[in-house]
Amino acid sequence: VGARSEVAGLLMKDLPSPSLLLLLLLATPAAALRAGVIGGGLGGLACCNALRKVGIEAEVFERAPKLSPQAGTGLTLWPNGLSALEAIDPGLSAHVLRAGSTTQHIEVTSADGLTKLPNPTGDPRRFPSTYGHPMANVRWSKLQKVLAARLPEGIIHLDRQLTKVEPAGGGVTAHFERSEGGAESAHFDLLVGADGINSALRQQLVGDGAPRDAGRTIWRSIIPYEERLLQAGSCSMSAGAGKVGFLTHLSEGELYWSAFATDEAIAKSGLVRGDFSSVKEYLVAQFSDVYKLLPVLERTPEEAILERRVADRVPLVDGSGKVA
């Protein structure tokens, strides 16, 4: 172990497990390695930061023409997530917390809100003393901005759509296209695929087709925060009969909501999407009986609602059965 050609060859051919990859990186002089990270989302940017912290010359290649402040919706980072970011880059968690808020109260109820259910995580106010970090809520694009800001200028290459990778010269060459025409390529010792569930790199290396549909749909958005909709510093989840409503206070002026339903619950409702003039009108009818969702749906502009099918991927395994 230790030769760059072996690292590249294993990556291209066998997709080694994370533990094997770590051993290979440790056995190879870090200063000699150049890495390309495909994808400028949260995973790609965090990975690039981590690689550069150990001396690997990592760069990010993102197909989007810009990092949009409107990309994504909201997310929650549990204490272990903040611990991971802090391990990558000491001081990073403080920047994340400034961009979002911390959860002080968690409410769990039945779908109609009439029955209070146990909160399996316990009181979130104990998290800092118990786990070292709080539970943080942040807008996806703000977290992306925080991670991007930790990288030197010129490390994130936008408008680069990966088209092909091939072994070359003891490493790997990645080929890219730009939206306005033109192509370019770059050579790396190590290439990391962080380009999402529809990864172009995964399709070339594995070719396992489309993601696995989970039989459910989620609708999400961010609206201006109002305390009458949700107590400050709180998150609320109501679930039952295949439907889930979730609200969380993201920051001083932002509230995130999501509405989730299984295909079975939608069929049982008897509501047909095509009978409604807009997705907002449909959601108001579909989720009017889910606690706290109706007022946030009514306040959400039609164009601000993000709809996605929930999907996942079958984990990759190498010849030894280890997850890759």
Image (cartoon, grey):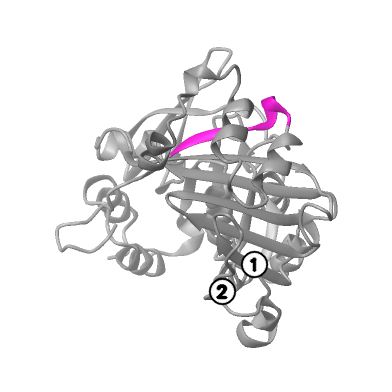
Mark 1 or mark 2, which is nearer the start of the sequence?
1
216 left or right of 17 in image: right
Q: Residues within 10 Å of mark 1 (few under 14, many from 20)?
A: some
- Quarter in which the C terminus is drawn: bottom left
Segment colored magenta: 301-309
Q: Is residue 47 left or right of residue 147?
A: left
**Residue that numbered label 2 is attached to:** 119
SS state under label 1: strand
The residue under the point 74% across, 55% down is: 250
Kind of residue at badge 1: Glu
Figure quadrant of residue 263: top left
**Quick one: SS at disc 2?**
loop
Residue 49's mark?
Answer: none
Q: Tell me which amino acid carries mark 2.
A: Asn
User: In which quadrant is the N terminus drawn?
Assistant: bottom left
The percent position of residue 67, horizontal first and vertical second, equals 67, 36
Q: Position of residue 284 (x, y in %)?
A: 62, 34
> Which residue is farthest left?
319
